[in-house]
Image (cartoon, rainbow, N blue to C red):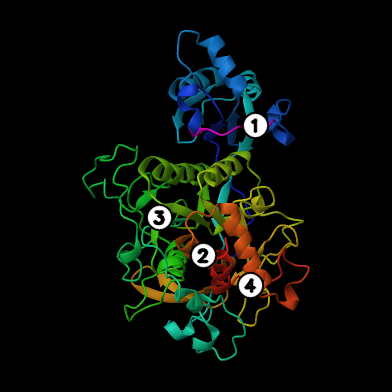
């Protein structure tokens, strides 16, 4: 959502992450190949490492190194983490999923840092990502104000373009067994529009303080709080509840709003704090969490909404998103709200749409079909637009309220993707992305030409029509 300060970077000085590929045959399926070491954090540039927090990518040479220094031990993640901690000069190390190890700095030993870099695949700071803060509009929420669902049903008589949602509902409102992950500030589990459509972990007993399903997360009934390291996913901001409501708020309950895909479920990943900021470490861990739910538990998670971002490129975050794609999870990211050109000044994770086929970057349009004044754009880097002005949705306390932002546009796309996947569940993330791009091409807007890869507005009804032929 919109915030002129969203590009501010905060580097914490106590966490180092180690991300990897095949550490050993026993856990090779959990890891993806690390890219080659390059850029400003290559092995020769140790001075940067002494000043900040970094993510290290474990490569095959890390395993070879471990076998030399610990010839009598098996190269498990736990053993490699312990050795990396000891030989790299870190206080402690914890595996956070996907072959990624969070390690706490233990000193300023340059020689040990050099060793750590040389045996790693890449190095990147543990950046902070932020929600794109909204511009509030003080109009009372009613269904008729949801112009994005269908302009002819809207009280906004001047609305000229919508997202074709009501037309799509003639085919599906979403499969109740399909789950969309929302990585944000949390959700309000007692909100009457959200509570019915929150995914529930049936293998976990709420509030007993026990990891009943033995997945490493205690009381993860609705998801998990990766900021507070607990099962309480309550929204202490408002952003996450608003995003979740756009996707799957209960429809037909005579109150609040209706989500774009009111038949699907939401799994909550609280990765941002009360100020709307969160570390890459938590975001990456949350991605590995949903991949594990999907692959080990059979939870049908098909999309991940990321209405957050920052200007910093991270090989570790990119690797996690790539792994999500291989697990069949589409990633929808907000393009940002400073009115900038993402081709020239990238925003991540949105700009990973240039290199990962499972990532979509979304701009915001207004009721007139124009690019919103605050929306970032990019002829190459931003895929298309979705409604993002005066968007009514849920906020904590049982209320509904309107906000503007690409953070509101992205969940429209996540929800439409969920409708497509409910209708055609065998589609791959790259195929869904292509279908949504085609639907946008059918609703091109003159003012978007030269600003977006597909200069149009996504349309749910058209997307379902296109997917019918797949």
Which residue corresponds to mark 2? 411
Q: Horizontally, is 204 left or right of 310 in the view?
A: left
Which residue corresponds to mark 4? 457
State the SS at label 4.
loop
Q: Nearer the viewer, mark 4 or mark 1?
A: 4
Q: Is residue 345 above or below residue 410?
A: above
| Quadrant housing the C terminus | bottom right
Q: Nearer the viewer, mark 4 or mark 3?
A: 4
Spot the residue most to the left. Answer: 208
Which residue corresponds to mark 1? 122
Residue under the point 45% across and 46% down: 286
Residue under the point 66% across and 54% down: 347
Range shown magenta = 30-36
Q: Which badge, 4 or 1, is on the more N-terminal residue?
A: 1
Residue under the point 40% across and 59% down: 266
Image quadrant where residue 436 sits: bottom right
Q: Which badge, 1 or 3, is on the more N-terminal residue?
A: 1
């Amino acid at each position: 959502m919109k915030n002129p300060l969203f590009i501010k970077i905060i580097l914490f000085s106590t966490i180092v992450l180690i991300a990897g590929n095949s550490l050993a045959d026993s856990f090779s399926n959990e890891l993806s190949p690390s890219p080659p070491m390059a850029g400003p954090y290559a092995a020769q540039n140790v001075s940067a490492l002494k000043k900040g927090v970094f993510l290290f990518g474990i490569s095959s040479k890390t395993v070879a190194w471990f076998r030399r220094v610990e010839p009598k031990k098996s190269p498990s993640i736990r053993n490699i983490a312990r050795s990396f901690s000891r030989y790299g000069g870190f206080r402690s190390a914890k595996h956070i999923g996907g072959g990624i190890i969070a390690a706490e700095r233990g000193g300023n030993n340059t020689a040990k840092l050099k060793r750590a870099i040389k045996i790693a695949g890449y190095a990147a700071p543990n950046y902070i990502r932020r929600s794109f803060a909204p511009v509030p509009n003080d109009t009372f929420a009613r269904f008729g104000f949801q112009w994005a669902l269908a302009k002819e049903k809207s009280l906004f008589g001047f609305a000229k373009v919508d997202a074709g949602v009501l037309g799509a509902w003639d085919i599906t409102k979403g499969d109740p067994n399909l789950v969309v992950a929302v990585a944000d500030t949390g959700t309000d589990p007692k909100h009457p529009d959200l509570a019915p459509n929150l995914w529930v972990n049936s293998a976990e007993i709420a509030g007993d303080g026990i990891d009943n399903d033995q997945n490493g997360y205690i009381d993860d009934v609705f998801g998990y709080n990766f900021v507070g390291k607990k099962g309480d996913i309550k929204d202490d901001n408002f952003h996450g509840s608003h995003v979740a409501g756009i996707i799957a708020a209960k429809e037909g309950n005579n109150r609040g709003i209706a989500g774009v895909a009111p038949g699907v479920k939401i799994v909550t990943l609280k990765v941002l704090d009360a100020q709307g900021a969160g570390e890459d470490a938590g975001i990456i861990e949350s991605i590995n969490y949903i991949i594990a739910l999907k692959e080990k538990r059979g939870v049908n998670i098909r999309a991940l909404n990321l209405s957050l971002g920052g200007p910093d490129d991270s090989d570790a975050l990119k690797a996690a998103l790539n792994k999500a794609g291989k697990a069949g999870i589409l990633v929808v990211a907000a393009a940002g709200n400073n009115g900038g050109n993402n081709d020239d000044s990238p925003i991540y994770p949105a700009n990973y749409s240039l290199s990962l086929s499972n990532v979509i970057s979304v701009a915001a349009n207004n009721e007139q079909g124009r690019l919103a004044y605050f929306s970032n754009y990019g002829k190459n880097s931003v895929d298309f637009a979705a409604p993002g002005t005066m968007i009514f949705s849920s906020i904590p306390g049982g209320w509904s309220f309107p906000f503007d932002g690409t953070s509101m546009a992205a969940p429209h796309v996540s929800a439409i993707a969920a409708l497509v996947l409910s209708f055609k569940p065998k589609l791959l993330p790259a195929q869904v992305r292509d279908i949504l791009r085609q639907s946008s091409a059918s609703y091109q807007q003159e003012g978007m030409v030269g600003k977006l890869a597909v200069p149009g507005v996504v349309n749910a009804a058209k997307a379902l029509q296109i997917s019918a032929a797949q």
